[in-house]
Image (spheres, grey):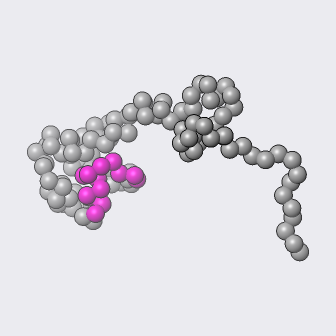
Amino acid sequence: MQWNLRLRAAERGIWKSAELRRMLARAGLEISAGKMSSWWAGTPITMRLDDLDVLCSVLECTMNDLMSPEPDKVAARRPRATEAANGEHAGPTSGADPGAPAVRPRLGAPRSTPPL
């Protein structure tokens, strides 16, 4: 998702995060300076729906105005067709070293049982 908070705030004449934080406080949402900084500087990892509701109210916008989908990023996370055809999984190590063998589970004897 593309986070558009600063753009929406600028459209309302809000140029500083402290100003938006004061407006949110007047609307009943008290947030820390650190949380406001993370919202202002980049895309928040998580956000409560109640907080999003107040933010949209203060900025007189909708969630769709604050967030835009990025389908290209989603498509980039999917395994390539050749990997899927070969039964390979695109995991955190895929692409790290193209010459390294793929990690596969061992088949055969089960693990031993723990001692009594």
In percent of width and height, residue 77 lies at: 50, 36
Is residue 38 magenta-colored? yes
Please tell me in which quadrant of the rendered image residue 99 appears: top right
Q: Residue at x 10, y 45 (%)?
A: 13
Q: Residue at x 63, y 37 (%)?
A: 89
Q: Is residue 54 in sight in this rendering?
A: no
Q: Is residue 91 left or right of residue 105?
A: left
Q: Residue at x 82, y 45 (%)?
A: 107
In percent of width and height, residue 90 lies at: 59, 37
Q: Quadrant of the N terminus?
A: top left
On screen, residue 102 above or below 45: above
Q: Is residue 114 left or right of residue 17?
A: right
Is residue 68 magenta-colored? no
In percent of width and height, residue 50 lies at: 36, 54
Q: Residue furthest left?
A: 13
On screen, residue 77 above or below 20: above
On screen, residue 23 above or below 104: below
